[in-house]
Image (cartoon, coloured by chain):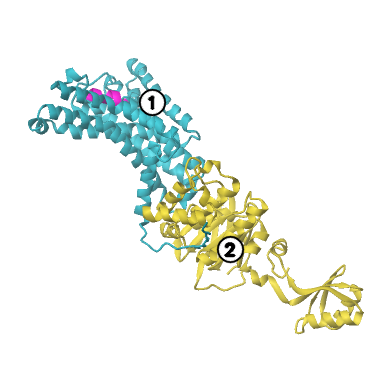
Amino acid sequence: MAEGIVFDLGYKPHEGIRLGRSGARRALVRDGLRRVLGLRRRARSKILPAALMAIAVIPALFFTAFGVIAGEFDVSATLFGHASYFDLNGSMALIFVALASSELLIPDRVHGTMSVYASRPLTTPDYVAGRATALAIVVFAFLWIPHLVLFTGRAWVAGFGSYVTDNYEILWQTALASIVYFVGYTSIAFLVAAFSKRTAVAAGVFLGIVMMSGATAALVDAGYSIFGLGAILDHPGYIKDWILGSPQGDWIPARAGMEPIASLGVIVVLAVASGLVVVGRYRRAA
Amino acid sequence: MHPGSVTAVTDTSILSITGLRFAYGDIVALDGVSVDVPAGRIGLVGANGAGKTTLLKLLLGVLSPGEGSIRVLGHSMPQQTLEVRSQVGWMPERDCLPPDQTASDFLGYAAELGGLPVRAARQRASDILGLVGLHEERFRYMGGFSTGMKQRAKLAQALVHDPDLVLLDEPTAGLDPEGRAEMLDLVRRLDEFGINAIISSHVLTDIESTCDWVVMLDGGKVLRSGPLTALSTPDVAELEVIGDAAAVAQLAVGMGASVEIDGSSLTISAPGSDPFTIARDAVLDAGAAFRRLGTKRTTLEDVFMSGGDSDG
């Protein structure tokens, strides 16, 4: 039997390149993606993201396959137009944002990992932006990929060509609407997560706040139109219909007589305010 | 320069602080702190609440100074915070490890955050985990680590991006004697790695055994800043005698020395003369014998208890 020899290799300094702040930012986003999707984590961390992603995408795949096989792919045959598909995966995105936001922000603060970020070439806004970017990538993919699938399926059935040139606008419209859904939900979710210690509680509180915002409908119906601004759940959908030019549903801001631009203003103000509060909160957490 | 300082400013200072003041609201944490410390292993000692952790956070730019200036590795704080953070590692006192990540994954990520490319980061993570004795545990989730393993992992994350300076906040906290010895051995080895260290601790013996310079804080002020070697005083003899200690003391005083006596122990100082020659002659003349003879050695505890006077 050969005898092994243990060599103490000692400490080897890093002599290669250093990527500095930009490298640190990219690392932050990569880690955020892994965290949101449960990658390199225990198996149970992967289940929920995978299930929600599947629920969001599978209908699009199914109806695309159905349409391609049937050789017919109009909205009446597939049940789903682009606008109504948002009503399905917008709900999935809401749950996903609730879970992913708390998973992104809370453990770093509760487990003291902010101390590690404080000794790396990063600022607190870098940290918050990196986490938001990771979530944005996943939520955007979550919301927009089904539309790409639907578009591709319809183009296939139609033989591409004129279908693509006549309808390509739907791609940027759905992309824009996806961003609105992301910003509209994430700003509140980040705010709640920044002040919570437990991920499940944060997700529950966020969903509770958003769902309860539906109660503003009663106040709006009672004549208090200003409460239409508080309809957090409905703002993204209302703006989505505006972007897609589709018939507008029974959104609370619409019932309050507000223009879609007012809903957009609410989303932007909430996002800026939330960003400032979360940065302030995490600056103190290191 | 602060009256407690015993050395001049050097060109190789890793840390230079002038007139630093910081308060949490009405509570003053640091007041009038001015120190210059050279490269090497620097001890930062003081009782709980002395301002040690606050000072470390100021060095990292986590807190901004109310008054005064700070230069870390030649960079002004807080203006050059990112430059400093690129070159510094921090081992905080409290936990900083995500329990749902393996040591290998977290160390790789910590290295990437330090600016290392992905492949180099993973290699460094493996190397550093081996260095701190966690190679066998590298694929375990850190939530299951013992206190000793967590302390090693915390040190590893501070080193993994190859910093020029590490700030270690109570590195032996919560460790058993064996773990404490191993951690202190790792800290001592930082010198051979070419990494400077500022080690914050309220355990004075830890600082004595690992550092070559000490900064003492008390109530937010600097009691003393200087090399540990300056704590030994070669012109003062300390002896313990078998026989009549009072007679020895009397004879030594007759030879022009100043003597302090405590039971059978004597401290002899003789400005302009050799205290050891006086001690030898006095013991011989008194017909006594030596049990112990040596230079007076002042411990950090002596200095601390005397309020920073190194002669105390």
Q: Position of residue B273 (x, y in %)?
A: 77, 84
Which is more foreground, mark 2 or mark 1?
2
Chain given the colour cyan: A
Q: Which residue is drawn at 51% across and 69% down?
A: B13
Q: Mark 1 points at which residue?
A: A210
Q: Where is residue B133 in the image (x, y as percent from the top left)?
A: 55, 54
Picture quadrant where residue B224 is located: bottom right
Q: Where is residue A104 in the image (x, y as percent from the top left)?
A: 42, 39
Few, some or many residues within 10 Å of mark 2 (<14, 14–19, 20+)? some
* Residue type at the position of mark 1: Val
Q: Are marks 2 and 1 in contact (CB under 8 Å)?
A: no
In the image, residue A86 lies in the stretch drawn in magenta: yes
- For residue A218, say whether it is visible: yes
Q: Where residue A154 is drawn, which disc sits there? A: none
- For residue B115, say whether it is visible: no
Which chain hosts label 2?
B
Q: Where residue B188 is drawn, which disc sits there? A: 2
Q: How far, Cα to Cα, is label 2 from label 1?
A: 55 Å
Q: What stretch is highlighted in magenta?
A: A83-90
* Residue type at the position of mark 2: Arg
| B13 horizontally vs A28: left or right | right
Question: Can you say which quadrant of the picture contains the N terminus of chain B?
Answer: bottom right
* Residue in front for this viewpoint, A1 or B305: A1
* Residue in front for this viewpoint, A2 or B179: A2
